[in-house]
Amino acid sequence: MAITWEAERPSDYLTRLASSDFGSAYKSLVLAELGLQPGATVVDLGCGPAADLAPLARAVGSAGRVVGIDHDASAVAIAAQATLAHPQVEVEVGDVHRLTLATGSVDRVHTDRVLQHVDDPDAVIAEAARIMRPGGVAAFAEPDWGTLVIDSPDPSIPEAYRRFICDQVIRNARIGRQVPALCEHNGLTVSRVLPVTGVFRDVATADRVFGFQRVTHRAVEAGYLTAGDGAAWLSHLRSASLFVSLTLFATFAERS
Ligand SMILES: C[S@@+](CC[C@H](N)C(=O)[O-])C[C@H]1O[C@@H](n2cnc3c(N)ncnc32)[C@H](O)[C@@H]1O
């Protein structure tokens, strides 16, 4: 198995995930469903190194405005370089819990795999609702790690592995299923929840997304797997005909 993730900058991993078959398929679906019009203002919360800023810029055209916000200054610097050809794009370092944008000032909000990591997803959705104009639409694309399915001769091992990820690795691991209720809690109307399931059969691709070796070692240290089960699990992943799947839910919500 090619273990390369840890040696890379997170921005490299994010860029490659965004351009993988799964990444580009669900990103296109989300963008199409967001219904961006030329001239619109759209904010990408947690934009990272700009996977979505150029497509957003193309959708709103030269009369539109795209604002990318991320708290990681190095990702924002990469995003600024990557979008030089799109003068309608602005990127800034900021915390998505506390936006500086004015109330009712944007047409669309886009977030992709951000709420899973934040301290308080409810507060971030409240901010998204605040900055949208009446009629504005937000898209929140978030995985639900409770949907992680990995085939194994001993099903108790992937179940323990998934439990470790949900308990200890991803801060808001079951956010995918929680976003619709959080939108409603913040006065938004949920118009659609679009499920997108990625199925990974290639070990190297799956390892880039899931970091099997690193996560398995941590699961053993945390007592979720025995050392023997951890070794058997990694050996199975290296040698077996792989089946890994994860579902991401894209929730679309409108401000009335
Ligand atoms: C999984 S990455 C997704 C990046 C990008 N949306 C994409 O699709 O490639 C999550 C991003 O959220 C950002 N992030 C996490 N918490 C944040 C916060 N409180 N404020 C701003 N950005 C945050 C991280 O720095 C990271 O760039």
Image (cartoon, rainbow, N blue to C red):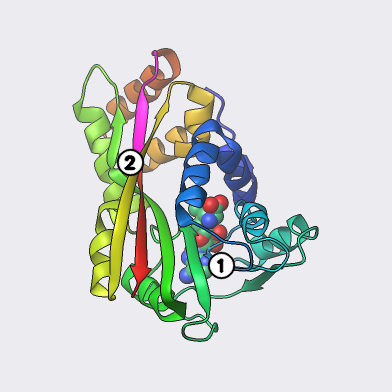
Q: Residue at x 27, y 60 (%)?
A: 180
Residue under circle 1? 42
> In the image, residue 158 lies at what x, y percent?
27, 31
Of all residues, the one furthest to the right in this rendering is 85
Snapshot quadrant of residue 7: top right
From mark 2 to mark 1, how far is it between C-alphas? 39 Å
In the displayed structure image, the side of residue 88 where residue 5 appears, left or right: left
Name the foreground residue: 212 vs 250: 250
Any part of residue 162 in sight:
yes
Give the position of the C terminus as an image quadrant: bottom left
Name the foreground residue: 62 vs 81: 62
Image mark for residue 219 = 2
Vertically, is 212 above or below 180? above
Ligand 1 within 8 angstroms of badge 1 C-beta: no
Q: In the rendered structure, which amino acid carries the disc numbered 1?
A: Val
In the displayed structure image, the side of residue 163 where residue 19 appears, left or right: right
Tell me which segment is drawn in magenta: 241-247
Q: Residue at x 62, y 56 (%)?
A: 59
> In the image, residue 243 lies at what x, y percent?
36, 22
Of all residues, the one furthest to the left in this rendering is 156
